[in-house]
Amino acid sequence: MVRYGPYWINLGMAPYKRVLLVDDDEDDQAFFLEGIKGLDQRVDCIVAQNGKEALEILLTDYPKPDIIFLDLNMPLMNGREFLSTIRNYGQLLRIPIIILSTSSEENLKLETVKLGARGFITKPDKFHLWESTLSEFFTDARLKSDR
């Protein structure tokens, strides 16, 4: 496990202070973390390499994340397996899980929502787009929570 943070990110009034990123791709980790860092408000980011490691983190005494960003294609326990497994832990069901995927297929979005994901972000293919993609997501999440 690698611990990153705290970073400052601007999430408006969204209550996301602790973020768990589950992704085995080091480039995507770096892009995500730099995108978060470029936003402004203090957030503690923890990175897990796969679903198995993420579950181990979640079952420790470490403070639970406020939100999980989950890649789908990883070794040991992929994102779909993680979504299915986390259902067995009632205390973890309140944590929103947002899928990060290179795919933008509607079938995949629907499948992950059925498995319990609360959102879906298609990974930007260029580094400079990560910050705006994350900013747009958090702005949208804040607006939905204000309703």
Image: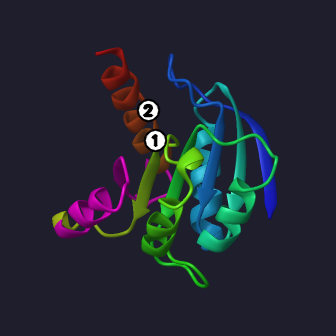
Kindly identify which numbered label has been placed on residue 134. Answer: 1
Q: Is residue 39 above or below residue 91?
A: above
Confirm whether the magenta stretch covers residue 68. Answer: no
Give the magenta range: 107-129
Report the quarter where the C terminus lies: top left
Q: Is residue 12 above or below residue 76?
A: above
Q: Are marks 2 and 1 in contact (CB under 8 Å)?
A: yes
Specify few, some or many for label 1: CA neighbours under 10 Å numbering under 14, 14-19, or 20 or more: many
> How many numbered dots are placed on residues in this image?
2
Q: State the colouring used for the structure image.
A: rainbow
Foreground tag (2 vs 1): 2
Residue 125's image quarter?
Answer: bottom left
Residue assigned mark 2: 138
- Residue at 52% over, 53% down: 69
Q: Is residue 108 left or right of residue 56?
A: left
* Helix, strand or loop at mark 1: helix
Give the camera-side residue of 143 and 126: 143
- Residue at 36% over, 47% down: 118
Q: Is residue 130 left or right of residue 115?
A: right
Label 2, label 1: how far apart the Cα atoms are: 6 Å
Q: Position of residue 133 (x, y in %)?
A: 40, 44
Report the quarter where the N terminus lies: bottom right
